[in-house]
Amino acid sequence: MSTIEEIANVIKNLKSAVIFTHTRPDGDAIGSAMALSRALSLCNIKNQVVDDSVIPEKFAFLCPDIRRFPTLDAEGYLCVDASDENRLGELTSTFRKGAKKGKITVNIDHHVSNTRFCKYNYVRESASNSENILELIVALGVPLDRQISQFLMAGIVTDSGGFSHNDVGGDTFRAAALVSDGGADVCEIAYQLFRKQSKARATMYAEVISHLRYLLEDRLAVALVTQEMLARYGLGQDATEGIVDFGLTVDSVEVSVCLMEAKKGQYKASFRSKGKVNVNEVAGVFGGGGHVLASGCVFFGEPEEVVDRLRYAVLQHLGE
């Protein structure tokens, strides 16, 4: 694995770069990408941030200029917060074609399931990938201005669950202190990302939670969001973010899962664990992955069939 100093030197020699992050980006993906973009701009390196998804409205204050497809024929392809190239979604083929043509590829990530798919890889497990991006920005010699600090704080706060996850340690708090000193407004970030929502989203959330299913003697909670629900409330798929976290507030629940119907017969699953179950391993059974406490995958089939497969997989990892 490359050191952060080696990667910083590689980036310093680039004249241009495209920054990729994972499909359906969360706050850490966007914060990582936008902070790196700002740092590259301050180094006079022309760059673009790309993602194949429609960016959720709640992140609009962070990312006014994320493209769906690169228009820059850049020297470097930099991937942030993506555990493997398939996580780039519809941009996977673009990335692969560029790599084959000799573009310099760099991978900065914090997922235990990372496949080291680039020429230069820096993968350090941490509460958020924004902590790794902060380390890179410092290695680049770029000062932490308010914009960079705001992006990084958004990523840290999001992936650490507001500093509540059990992978949060001194490094996370030290990173947060640095970006706070740099001008990050944690109060604004917390409101925008965790508390602000439309009436339609609040009503849909209440409906989903009221139909939460408890399995395995209440150790597994499963929420289901259908296409019909989203259409009825006039919401996009991004409205499902955060639903999975509710299940873990129930004291008996060890694993919480949110199943979102992407299309008929296809469900995107988000997993959360209190720590007894490694949900990276559970998601891995179905071709997914992520973190020990937070992972995802895709299921195919009818809803009851999906729930039954999910129930069995979690049971095998409860360790009893």
Image (cartoon, rainbow, N blue to C red):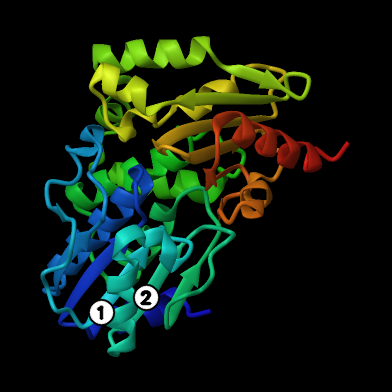
Depicted 95 relative to depicted 50: above or below: below
Specify which label sits upstream in the sequence, 2 or 1: 1
- Name the mark on residue 106: 2
Find residue 68 and report its horizontal and vertical position in percent: 18, 56
Q: Is residue 81 left or right of residue 49?
A: right
Give the tally of numbered discs. Answer: 2
Could you tell me if residue 197 is visible in this image? no
209 or 308: nearer the viewer = 308
In the picture, the quarter occupied by the C terminus is top right
Q: Residue at x 17, y 37 (%)?
A: 61
Q: Which amino acid, mark 1? A: Gly
148 or 290: nearer the viewer = 290
Q: Quadrant of residue 216?
A: top right
State the SS at label 1.
Answer: strand
State the SS at label 2.
Answer: strand
Q: Is residue 255 left or right of residue 55?
A: right
Q: Residues within 10 Å of mark 2 (few under 14, many from 20)?
A: many
Find residue 225 and report its horizontal and vertical position in percent: 44, 25
Q: Residue at x 80, y 42 (%)?
A: 316
Q: Is residue 39 left or right of residue 21?
A: left
- Write down the residue under mark 1: 76
Q: CA distance from mark 2 to mark 1?
A: 8 Å
Depicted 125 relative to depicted 44: above or below: above
Residue ranking furthest to the right: 320
Could you tell me if residue 300 is visible in this image? yes
Q: Residues within 10 Å of mark 1 (few under 14, many from 20)?
A: many
Residue ranking furthest to the bottom: 102
Q: Which amino acid, mark 2? A: Val
Find residue 290 and report its horizontal and vertical position in percent: 55, 52
- Callout 2 touching callout 1 (CB < 8 Å): yes
